[in-house]
Image (tube, helix red, strand yellow):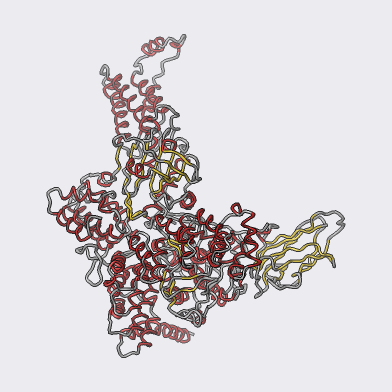
Amino acid sequence: MNVELFINNSALPRTRYIGWAPSPCSIHLSNLTGVTGPVTVELRNKPPAKGGRFVFRRTLTGPSTTTLRLVLPAKGAAVNFFMLGQFPHASFADRDAVVQVRSGAHVLLEVPLMVRIRKNANLLGTAEVSRFVAAFATFNNQGLGRFVDFRNMHVAASSPEAHGAPGFLPWHRAYLLDLERELQAIDPSVALPYWRFDQPAPKIFSLGFLGVSNSLGTVQFSATNPLQFWRTDGVTGITRRPLFNTTTSGASVITEAQTFALGTQYAPFSAMEGNPHGNAHTSFGGSISSIPTAARDPLFFLLHANVDRLWAKWQRLNSRYNAGQLASFGPTGTNRIGHNVNDTMWPWNQITAPPRPSTAPGGSLANSAVATAPGSKPRVGDLIDYQGVVAPAGRVGFDYDDVRFA
Amino acid sequence: MKAKKKSKAKVKAKAKKPAAASTSSYWAAVSSTKKTTKQRIDALSRLPAALCEDRTKFNEVLAILRDTTQSSSLRRATLQIIQSASFSAPNFEVCRPDYLATLRALVTDPDLELRQRALGMLAREHDGSTQRLLVDGLEEPSRAVVPPEKALQLLGYDIHTDVYAIARKIAANPPNEAARIEALRLLGADTASVPMFEAMLQDKKEKVDARRLAASALQALVPDKLQGYARDIVQDETDDDDVKATSLTALTDLGHAGTVSDALYQSVDKIRSKSKSTALKQSARRFIDKYRR
Amino acid sequence: MALSEKEFEELVDGLKASADGRERLAGLLNETHPVYAERAASAIVRMRGWILLALGELGVSDRELVYVLEELDTGREPYLVAAAARALRSYPNLGGSLRPHLERAQANIRYRDDALRLDRYGGYADTPPYGTAMAELEETLRSIDTRAESVPASGCCCGSAARASGSAGAARAQPATQFQDHRGSALSFAEAFVGRPSIVVFFYTRCSNPQKCSLTMTKFGRLGEQLRARGLDSEIRTAAITYDPDFDDADRLRQYAESRGVHLDENHRVLRPVNGFEGLGEYFDAGVSFVGSIVNRHRVELYVLDASGRVARSFQRVLWDEGEVIEAAVREIAKTPSGPKPPDPPAARSSASPTTALLGTVFSVAAAFFPKCPMCWAAYLSALGVAGLERIGYAPWLLPLFIALMLANLYSLYPRDRSRRRRVAFGVAVAGALTIWGPGILLEIPFAPLVGAMLTAAGSFLAVRFRLTAPAMTAHPSGA
């Protein structure tokens, strides 16, 4: 008698990544030799749980438990349940969490998985940093890789698609998600970390991570850091000159609390596009401080991950997951194209007729092994319920280390 | 009931008013010479979203930036805030020409920090007047507005400039090491510089930073060739540890298993166990982890 | 570089006063002019802007119009766009047909505008007063409105005149260029381009103007889709050639093309010349200039080659239409001495088909020669020689039926796309029908039915012929 466990609706290893939001799972008996009746099994975190931890829910809205007892039908029918990361215990490495399925004292199955969470980049371990920069450098591939499409998505010509209107936050959320999925295609254990720009971040701005700027603003890397081969627009290297002391202070931005105080409704809250977002960019000299060149610097993506995290946290504080509510997105239907809830978003919609930009680099939004949302041509509203709070099918497959599931 | 509704409405209206009053008071504070610099900077920081809505007021802010009698900190804060507003391109559309004109006026400003930042912003826009100014300064140092290494760095934002000839001269005969490195970085876009980088990488007497930069340039320009050089360097016991570490990183992150011979693998394994350099051991470990046999 | 920019500025100023100034200024706009060699791209912007402004002062004619429209269609430098907009105001046939170019320029430049002094070489402004590219574009649009009110439409096909599409130039010897394609395979010019018609574009991956190379490759991808949809992808080859072969290796080329939706296979490639680049450039008269190894200026250019690899048609400077390009290539298929004919294009805008045309002609002839009496009817049927046919009864109702069918044929020939050629064919068929009906049936003028039948037949067959060589529909996705 065996059991088969499906995580995120599949038994494949590439789907064994969960976050704080419930992932649909199922278990059933396979190889029914010797099975005479229903079998009771218990699922649990295999001890010792040193890495990621998870909990179970029998139903989507039911209580979370650290173990789950299920009765499996003798004929092999599947029993559904949910797994979710146990906040705040994210994994440190791939497969450092293990689901153990027992029948009595007998272990039937052990499946390793990862509680894959976007973390504060300044708190990452050495191995996590190493995996992230390696994946990013591979993605850039000395200017040859697909990163060039992401660089070309964020230029002056495409600015109206992504800035200055309500779609700013959803567009960048989709942008980061697309990039993260591409990184995960290289190394599935990677999640996009965020730069907490209102705090000092000495580890981020180090030779082994995103580099140390010399007095000119040319970024230096250690000889072991693959980002030393980073190349964009035909030029090797990164130009970034902090206008603040990265070791002892944050950028000149408003604090997290001040950001949330901008408003409990989306419209006033989205003024964060100016400060802290714009201020974070312009706390440097160099590529990241101008729109046409900002995406040349890998720090750009960690900056925007923090912008997105602030939005996610604000959403949780104010229960803003319903795209149909004014409070969650603001007025819709009369905004510039690409900034209404039901608008598709460039470039993923591949529309190049006016008023959209004339080229759409990068193709559709990357797929994920762990979530079907938001689809390859997402609409603005598809990025609002990112955890599947309103509709479970809306879960897109990422979470932040300090924003639990609603 | 009606009275209650009315008073609720009054409270709401009152709550709205302070916001409108604040914006105009912030504008007033920005321009006020009676306020302290800190107060004026604080007032500016509350305006980004509204910065371009009123062009007259926006030009008053630009006037602060142009005014060399204003304090440096106020002018720099003003520049940062305008730059921050420029990120919202659709809302900044009508203000952009005025902004660029003001930046051009700052490229010869007595404040070096403002000068550099203005030049940087213009260089990133591929502004021709800025490129011409920077190249002039390289060709005739008496006309330079920034040090040569800074000029070279800024010219690197656009590979379509005519700086390559002067960059080659500076690389061969640099006024300082920083200028040389920036010249070399810039030449990494020039396929005609491949022989120079090849010679540099293989020259053990060359400075380590320059050799590492040569490796980056070659990885971009002639990746297969660089991989070959990297394999040779890693197996050369007399070569520099940092250059070896860079070579191993290139082989690990940008190479392919098919090019890893047994001899190379064993060399790297030996480095992993015996090297005294932490960086080199680390890069060897990564190599072995990737190409494990 | 022989000239400093100051000297160049003075040269242009001097040409404004010269008798052949306009022609010489236009000559300076050729990208391969030595005056652009080894210049920064930004210097070339200054130079070309100054030339356009000078042409504007002299008055832009049809010959120079294409250079103006080029900047409006694909320019991203405010100074050049402003200069082009201003120069366009001097064009004597300024009319509504040029509006789309101006509107495209507005879309291209609105978030990249700059403060400009067009009275200064280079246009850079650091203090007020100054203008902007958007202001120049708006001024030119207002000029169009003003002229539309005061001057009747001239009927000038201004836009098409300025498309700088050319027909076959002088026959040139094939270049001895060797290519490497996106898979790393080697091939010669002959292997790449001889044997069937080809569509060739030029680009390079380090191009910083998304309205040029990135857009060219995106359109190249759409062109490939249309070829596949029409079943022409094995009849017509396509190739995108890089200007920058030293930098653009096979991997880079493939990545760039595929990320813009280009489908690559053995007939549809991206190529880098591994040698003989100069000869290739001369063969195509490619419009490109360099600073060191890097392109500093190039034009948008597409070439349709015949099956022998000769340039049959060129599309330069302004944005080309995928459908028009494909039709130019389809014409080359028809000219190919041996080899398969192109498959029928999808349903054309009129429903004319050879069958319809034949039937229509038959009905028209039948109506023309319909016997007026039962005896004539029997005589006709007997003359057809089929035994017993004459015993079929006289059916006068057949005449109105034939006339109705003849009208139905005319309806099918009606050119819904208002193509000039199909209008001619329709006109001939109508003349034939009127001749049959009026002088033939009503007035019973001898030879009138015969003349009418011949005209009807001619009109029907012309319509079929033009349909076979018609431009295909180009579907554009709607913005939503």
Q: Position of residue A388 (x, y in %)?
A: 60, 66
Give the camera-side residue of B121 and C33. C33
Q: Nearer the viewer, residue B193 or B123?
A: B193
Q: Can residue A344 be seen in the rendering of this structure?
A: no
Q: Is residue C145 left or right of residue A121?
A: left
Q: Is residue B60 above or below residue B272?
A: below
Question: Is A303 displayed left or right of C90 in the figure?
Answer: right
Q: Residue at x 36, y 36 (%)?
A: C174
Residue C131 pos. (x, y %) = 24, 66
Q: Which quadrant would residue C80 be assigned to in this image?
A: bottom left
**Residue B234 or residue B217, whichever sits in front:** B234
Q: Quadrant of the N terminus of chain C?
A: bottom left
> Percent x, y for residue A235?
43, 62
| B242, above or below C462, in the image | below
- Position of the C terminus of chain C by quadrant: bottom left
Using the image, determine if residue C116 lies above or below residue C425.
below
Residue C373 quadrant:
top left
The residue at 37%/64% (across/down) is B172
Above or below, B125 relative to B12? above
Task: Say if residue C261 shows up in the picture.
Answer: yes
